[in-house]
């Protein structure tokens, strides 16, 4: 259990990190966040701050800001730009909601709410980096797309799930044709 002063310190650091992200000062944002131990953040020590500061970690944060998955076609542009730093906060802190830092009810203009849009930005950045790494380092040539295997999987995601693709032909994930209110939760696994 955190003391009141520890909670206040964490909130202060989170606000500083959010400000730095809004200025696109990504490395400084992660270095500032790293003044808190990961266990404080609820990540449980599975990663360390070096993972976020690595080339891959920085690329994921940059891609959250620079790349837009096609599933977000039609999103309100102002809302998208407000959500990018919040998505990066979710990635850095391991949180599941933008509500920790934004209380305004953002209208996205599409069937996905703000939390889901932020997750789609994170998933897209993650998958772009995984595919790039698989191409360059591991030499993978074939991937398989798997859906979340639950009642919220839409017909479009079910259609691509279980299929194997050449890495240069893999569909974009999150899948643009997904109609689930939870957003696309498909994942890519590398076969060979």
Image: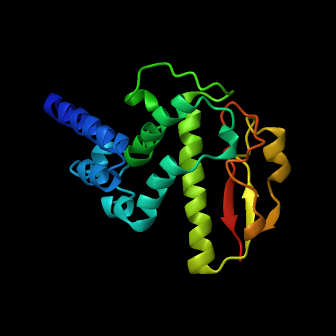
Is 170 placed left or right of 98 in the picture? right
Residue name at image x 79 percent, y 53 percent: 161
The quarter of the picture where residue 17 lies is top left
Residue name at image x 39 percent, y 57 percent: 46
Residue name at image x 67 percent, y 64 percent: 189
Tell which residue pokes out farthest to the left in this image: 5
Above or below, 87 against 135 in this view is above
Residue name at image x 41 percent, y 21 percent: 103
Is 63 placed left or right of 46 in the picture? right
Report x, y in % for residue 97: 47, 33
Report x, y in % for residue 168: 74, 69
The residue lying toward the viewer, choosing from 93 and 78, is 78
The residue lying toward the viewer, choosing from 74 and 93, is 74
Above or below, 4 against 183 in this view is above
Report x, y in % for residue 166: 78, 70
- In this rendering, the count of numbered labels is 0
On the rendered image, what quadrant is the N terminus found in? top left
Q: Can residue 97 be seen from the camera position used here? A: no
Is 70 placed left or right of 93 in the picture? right
On the rendered image, what quadrant is the C terminus found in? bottom right
Q: Can residue 173 be seen from the camera position used here? A: yes
Q: How is the image coloured?
A: rainbow
The residue lying toward the viewer, choosing from 62 and 5, is 62
């Amino acid at each position: 259990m955190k003391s009141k002063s520890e909670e206040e310190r964490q909130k202060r650091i989170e606000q500083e990190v959010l400000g730095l992200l809004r200025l696109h000062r990504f490395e400084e944002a992660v270095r500032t966040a790293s003044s808190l131990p990961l266990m404080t953040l609820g990540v449980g020590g599975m990663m360390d701050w070096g993972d976020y500061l690595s080339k891959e970690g920085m690329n994921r944060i940059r891609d959250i800001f620079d790349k837009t998955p096609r599933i977000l076609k039609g999103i309100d542009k102002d809302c998208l730009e407000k959500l990018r730093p919040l998505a990066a906060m979710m990635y850095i802190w391991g949180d599941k909601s933008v509500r920790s830092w934004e209380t305004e009810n953002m209208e996205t203009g599409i069937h996905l709410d703000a939390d889901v849009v932020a997750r789609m930005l994170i998933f897209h950045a993650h998958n772009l980096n995984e595919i790039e790494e698989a191409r360059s380092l591991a030499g993978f040539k074939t991937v398989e797309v798997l859906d979340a295997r639950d009642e919220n999987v839409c017909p479009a995601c079910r259609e691509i799930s279980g299929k194997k693709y050449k890495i240069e032909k893999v569909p974009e994930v999150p899948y643009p044709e997904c109609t689930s209110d939870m957003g696309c939760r498909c994942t890519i696994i590398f076969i060979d």
